[in-house]
Image (cartoon, rainbow, N blue to C red):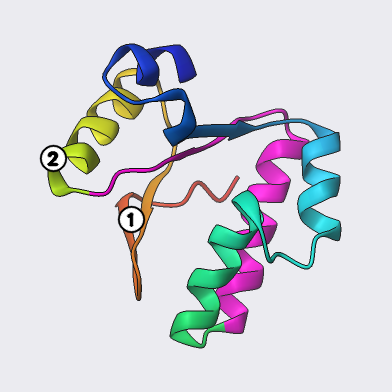
Amino acid sequence: MVSALTGGGFLESEVEFRSGAVDADQLGASAGRGGFTGLVLRFAERIGVADEELETKYRYEQAMRENRFVVSVAAATEERKARATQLLREHGAHTIAFMGAHTIEYITSPNNR
């Protein structure tokens, strides 16, 4: 999926992915103030929803433990967001969400397996 995103117009620096127990452990143990974890937790802090913060963090951690990929794509414009959505759908993404300054927009619903 990463190669599809980079081949589809995104820079390598705009795409991050995590999978497996090691990444899940890092997310689970993190205070969440930097990198991928920081993205998730900063969003929850901004809107003041600690429960959603923990739910989102748990969902990502569980996906990694199940050896699924959690992919983050920096998409600063609506056009980039549409392109990322298209590429992710074409390559089998189960859940697609965009984290804005004060919202989470679910393009496809969270996969609660």
Residue 65 vertical position relative to residue 30 in the rendered view, above or below: above
On screen, residue 69 versus residue 102, left or right, reads: right
Residue 77 x/y as whole percent? 19, 48
Residue furthest to the left in view is 79
Residue 45 vertical position relative to residue 85 in the rendered view, above or below: below
On screen, residue 41 versus residue 103, left or right, reads: right
Judging by the rendered image, the residue that carries numbered circle 2 is: 79
Judging by the rendered image, the residue that carries numbered circle 1 is: 106
The quadrant in which residue 54 appears is bottom right
Residue at the spot 78% in from the left edge and 68% down from the top edge: 31
User: What quarter of the picture does the C terminus occupy?
Assistant: top right
The amino acid marked with disc number 2 is Glu
Look at the image and tell me whether residue 1 can be seen. Answer: no
Magenta span contains residue 63: yes
How many numbered marks have been drawn onto this rendered protein structure?
2
Q: What's drawn in magenta, residue-wise?
A: 50-76
Q: Nearer the viewer, residue 104 or 3?
A: 3
Q: CA distance from mark 1 to mark 2?
A: 17 Å
Residue at the spot 60% in from the left edge and 30% down from the top edge: 69
Q: Secondary structure at mark 2?
A: helix
Magenta span contains residue 59: yes
